[in-house]
Image (cartoon, rainbow, N blue to C red):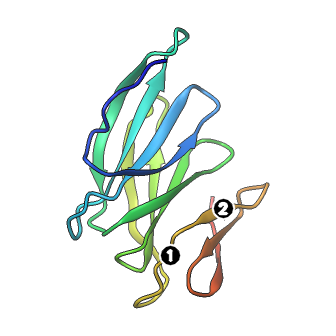
Amino acid sequence: MHSISSSTPIPFGFAVANNSYIYVSQAAGTPNASTVSSYYVKDDGSISLVDGSVGAGQTSACWVVLTNNGKYIFTTNAGSGSISSFKTNHSEDIAVLNAVAAATGTNSSPIDAALSNNSKFLYVLTRAIKLYQHLQ
């Protein structure tokens, strides 16, 4: 079994891409300090950090979802009441697309998320279920 320490202290959610990359949210435990990191899983099972601690200035990043084409990452930010969007490139670097791609509302605490099969709709579990359309 192989393991690697998280690039920040509180890893929370993750999404696995088809190309051996894993995207991990880190809740950070500090306001406005949540991040997303990418890791590569080699054929021997060893894991290496590719791009670490990319922040969108949000609090308590929880769930991570990845679009089917592997280009976009979304995180739910329970502490900020928001959803952040990120873009990846062919080298699996991560860039913030929209720090607040959608606001779910004060005290909404968005936690879980899922994309529709065609990645056109993002479903987010908050205190009420909400639907956000993803523009690809």
Q: Is residue 31 above or below residue 3?
A: below
Q: Which mark is residue 114?
A: 2
The amino acid on which the numbered mark 2 sits, given as a three-letter code, is Ala
- The amino acid marked with disc number 1 is Pro
Q: Name the residue that disc number 1 marks.
A: 110
User: Toward the viewer: 107 or 58?
Assistant: 107
> Seen from this angle, which residue lies furthest front?
1
Q: How far from the left and from the top, in percent, is residue 37?
A: 37, 42
Residue 43 relative to residue 95: left or right: right
Residue 119, image x and y in percent? 71, 57
Residue 103 vs 69, above or below: the answer is below
Q: Is residue 104 above or below residue 3?
A: below
Outermost residue, bottom direction?
A: 106
Quarter residue 2 falls in: top left
Looking at the image, which residue is at 50% across and 75% down? Answer: 110
Q: Residues within 10 Å of mark 2 (few under 14, many from 20)?
A: some
Q: Residue furthest left?
A: 30
* Quarter occupied by residue 19: top right
SS category of the residue bearing label 1: loop
User: Is 49 displayed left or right of 109 in the figure?
Assistant: left
The residue positioned 23% from the left and 68% from the top of the image is 32
Q: Which residue is found at the position 26% from the left and 57% from the top? A: 28
